[in-house]
Amino acid sequence: MIKHLENTDINFVRWDNCINNAINGNIFAYSWYLNILCDDWEALVLGNYEYVMPLFHKTKFNRNIYFSSKLGIRLGVYSNKLITHDIVQKFIDAIPSDKSLINLSLNLHNHINGANARIISTYELDLIQSHKKIAEKYSNQFQKDLESARINKITITQGLLPNELINFALTKKVYSKPKLKENEISQLRMIIANSLRYHLGETYCAYGDHNNLQAAAFFVKSKKKIHLLFAAISQYGILKNAFHLLIDKFIEVHSEKDLTLNIENSITKNNKEFFTGVGAHEVKYQQYYKNNLPWFYKLILNNN
């Protein structure tokens, strides 16, 4: 039987052991990461933490909802055992029914059917080959954009401090992805600080010819996955293809490793062209979305 646990009833040691051993475990599901995104997150647990699923809750429009975080993607059901469609559906069915809105991002091992299932696309690049082999597959346009960045004297370095990255992202005429609210920026700051402290994350940045910061990115690692969790770039950086050179440098550093890089939060003049140009492949995952809010609240949500 699947149990619904309040935060105070969760055994965090058993929880983290499950995530650590899960075939689909990722950094987003560890208790320290979940604690940053929602300090009283709840859980669905089957057996002795053989299968687990985190739930973020908050109040919106004076109603209780379960939500997905922009910084906590690919959650859902985790286990070191086989995760079948039936198991995932049982977890979905076990979600407390008193919530007016349920919006859950699922990981790639979770599959559901029905009207409440949404398909989301993301883009990933395997890094197991050498940088030379990967670069040979870059499109002609991507190669031209790289050369343009070099001609414009864009340079890439590592080790940008968390506050420097956040301050740059908040600068006028700098674009960031994902778009974050004030409380989410505070969460990002804590995630970056903790990830860097425990060698789970890296920051990369691009400077222009006058040593002005033009682009910055934070990558977070979990097992064999690396996610571009947050990116920011200036208007000049977009114009001069700074992000092309930044990603190419990251690929060069991490090539010939059994890693998959997720680059969905890249910011360029044409993201679709960028994804295909660098050789990334499209991957589809699902969201579970159920909205029982009154129609006027739905209208507000749709317009935000």
Image (spheres, grey):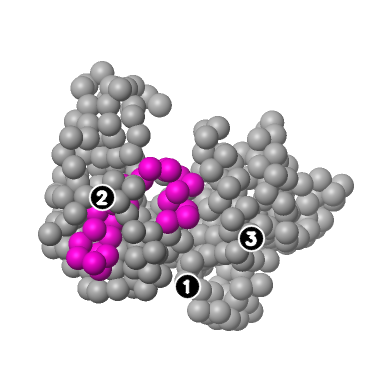
Q: How dense is the environment of label 3, judged by Cα within 10 Å: few (below 14), some, or many (20 and up)?
A: few
Measured Cα–Cα span from mark 1 to mark 2: 30 Å
Quadrant of residue 77 within the rendered picture: bottom left
Measured Cα–Cα span from mark 2 to mark 3: 30 Å
Q: On the picture, is 72 further left or further right than 195? A: left
Q: Residue 57 magenta-drawn? A: no
Which amino acid does the dot numbered 3 rest on? Arg
Percent across and percent down for residue 95 are: 19, 46
Q: On the picture, is 145 further left or further right than 13? A: right
Q: Which residues are magenta?
A: 31-54
Q: On the picture, is 55 further left or further right than 265? A: left
Residue at 19% x, 54% y is 3
Callout 2: SS: strand
- Foreground mark, 2 or 3? 2
Position above or below: 302 against 179: above
Residue at 18% x, 42% y is 96
Which amino acid does the dot numbered 2 rest on? Leu
Which amino acid does the dot numbered 1 rest on? Lys
Measured Cα–Cα span from mark 3 to mark 1: 19 Å
Residue at 22% x, 21% y is 295
Q: How dense is the environment of label 1, judged by Cα within 10 Å: few (below 14), some, or many (20 and up)?
A: few
Quadrant into which the N terminus falls: bottom left
> Which numbered tag is attached to residue 5?
2
Nearer to the camera, 250 or 191: 191
Nearer to the camera, 132 or 58: 58
- Foreground mark, 3 or 1? 3
Residue that numbered label 3 is attached to: 197
N-term-proximal mark, 3 vs 1: 3
Quadrant into which the C terminus falls: top left
Q: Does the image show residue 178?
A: yes
Residue at 61% x, 39% y is 175
